[in-house]
Amino acid sequence: MYSFIPDFGGFVVKANSEGQPGPHEYKRNHAEGANVLADAFVKLNYRPIICKLS
């Protein structure tokens, strides 16, 4: 797959669900939590697409 689409890949992040901590435990909102991940991905030359599904 990567030989055809070198930047193929993705992550699903579930915050504050199924008993796992998320940004709210750290007095942050979902946008702030998403920005932390986006900043990390940009440094790795990934192109983050972040949306909130409710």
Image: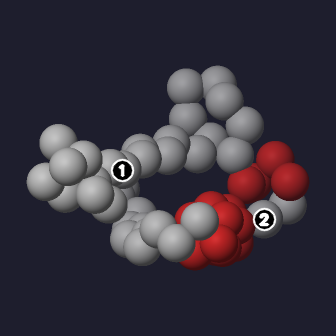
- Secondary structure at numbered mark 2: loop
The residue sitting at the right extreme is 26
Q: Which of the 4 quarters of the picture holds residue 17?
A: top right
Q: Is residue 36 left or right of residue 8?
A: right
33 w.r.t. 39: above or below: above
Residue under numbered circle 1 = 10
Q: Is residue 5 left or right of residue 48?
A: left
User: Observer-nearest residue: 54 or 40?
Assistant: 40
At 47% from the left edge and 68% from the top edge, which residue is drawn? Answer: 46
The image quadrant of residue 48 is bottom left
Mark 2 vs mark 1: in front = 1
Tell me if residue 5 comes above or below residue 1 in the rendering. Answer: below
How many other residues sit within 10 Å of disc 1, few (<14), some (14-19) or many (≥20)? few
Relative to 23, residue 31 above or below: below
Q: Which residue is mark 2?
A: 28
Q: How far from the left and from the top, in percent, is residue 8? A: 27, 54
Is any part of residue 1 visible from this angle? yes
**Label for residue 24?**
none
Q: Secondary structure at mark 1?
A: loop
- At 72% across and 37% down in the image, what residue appears? 21
Query: As drawn, which residue projects farthest toward the left?
Result: 4
Q: Quadrant of the N terminus?
A: top left
CA separation in Å, label 2 and label 1: 24 Å
Q: Foreground residue, 5 or 47?
A: 5
Which residue is pictured at 36% across the width and 50% down the height?
10
